Amino acid sequence: MDEDPVTQHFDSGRDVPDASRRPAPRPFVGVLMKCCRTYVRAYLNVAQDAFVGWCPRCAAKVEIEAVEEGGSTSRFFEAS
């Protein structure tokens, strides 16, 4: 006999990752690039010693040193 439509399970054919396999969010800080008046995110680099980002208009690089103690608690910065 046919199953109740409420209890039927359909396979969409897509491999949807569960929450346990999602990558951890990457740490970032916000930076206002004064050169072109635009906002970017600077992400923590692989060595985890600096936040690095580039202006999307002129490709100016910004690098903010990451320190464990005595650093800033701010999440937003300005760069020339």
Image: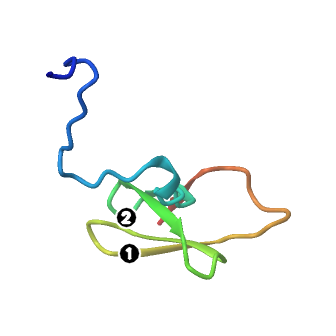
Q: Amino acid at mark 2?
A: Cys
Q: Gap in Å between the C-alphas at discs 1 and 2?
A: 8 Å
* Residue at the image position 48 percent from the left and 58 percent from the top: 21
Question: What numbered label is drawn on residue 31?
Answer: none
9 and 70: which is toward the camera? 9
| Circle 1 Cα neighbour tier, 10 Å, few/some/many (<14 / 14–19 / ≥20) | some
Q: Is residue 64 above or below residue 34?
A: below
Q: Earlier in the sequence, mark 1 or mark 2?
A: 2
Q: How many marks?
A: 2
Q: Are marks 1 and 2 in contact (CB under 8 Å)?
A: yes
* Secondary element at image label 2: loop
| Circle 2 Cα neighbour tier, 10 Å, few/some/many (<14 / 14–19 / ≥20) | some
Residue 46, located in which quarter of the rendered image?
bottom right
Q: Is residue 52 above or below residue 75?
A: below
* Residue at the image position 20 percent from the left and 22 percent from the top: 3
* Residue at the image position 51 percent from the left and 66 percent from the top: 43
Q: Residue 51 in the image: x percent, y percent?
A: 57, 69
Q: Is residue 2 left or right of residue 26?
A: left
Q: Residue 14 in the image: x percent, y percent?
A: 21, 52
Residue under label 2: 35
Q: Residue 47 in the image: x percent, y percent?
A: 62, 82
Q: Is residue 57 left or right of residue 48?
A: left
* Residue at the image position 45 percent from the left and 58 percent from the top: 41
Residue, far right: 69
Residue, far front: 1
Q: Amino acid at mark 1?
A: Ala
Residue, far left: 2
Residue under label 1: 60
Q: Residue 19 in the image: x percent, y percent?
A: 48, 48
Residue 37, located in which quarter of the rendered image?
bottom left
